[in-house]
Image (spheres, rainbow, N blue to C red):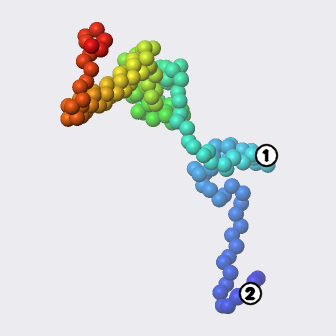
Amino acid sequence: MKTKLNGIAPPPRVLVSPGAERSKAERSDAERSAVPGETKTLPDPEVVVRAQRRQFTAEYKKRILAEADAAKEAGAIGAMLRREGLYSSHLTHWRQQRDLGLSPHRRGPKPNRNPLSEEVRNLKRQNDHLAQRLARAELIIDVQKKVSLLLGIPLAAVDNDGSNS
């Protein structure tokens, strides 16, 4: 037995059998189903840097909805949801999609449906730019007219056909 240091006894040493650190509920399925004496592969402790949203295919959704609709006994849907790792809100949302015949909602910017929309957008931008330049040019012409009147310089008159008279 170890001696006391400074009047304090060391903490008692607890011997723990393998696998007893965690309760049965805390151990993974692989640990619970492992055969004693068999080598176990430990799960990778590396955490994924960024979690990814689960995506379900249309076939999977149809299969799960058919299974849920076919469930007759009490608790069958709950058991199926636990087995598949789903929530009841998944079923609700998928049923709405099925009933409305909608495709799943895609996140992010919507694609252009009209191939001419890009050209229309460019032409509108060009039109706005030219309207600003025209307004600036008209302002400059008005200032030039007022300066010529103040200084008494006659301006050349322009005919309707664009020639100077």
Pointer 2 local density, CA inside 10 Å: few below 14, some 14–19, many at least 20: few
Residue 10 horizontal/vertical position (percent): 68, 81
Q: Residue at x 67, y 84 (%)?
A: 9
Location of the C terminus by quadrant is: top left
Location of residue 119 (image quadrant): top left
Q: Is residue 19 above or below residue 157?
A: below
Please state which amino acid type lies under the numbered disc 2: Thr
The disc placed on residue 3 is: 2
Determine whether 116 is above or below 56 in the image.
above
Q: How far across and down, in percent of the image, does residue 56 sit?
A: 53, 27
Disc nearer the start of the sequence (1/2): 2
Image quadrant occupied by the N terminus: bottom right
* Residue linked to disc 1: 38
Q: In the figure, residue 123 lies in which quadrant? A: top left
Q: Is residue 158 left or right of residue 122?
A: left
- Residue occupying image coordinates x 68% and y 76%: 12
* Amino acid type, residue under disc 1 in the picture: Glu
Residue 156 relative to residue 50: left or right? left
Q: Which x, y percent locates residue 95?
A: 40, 23
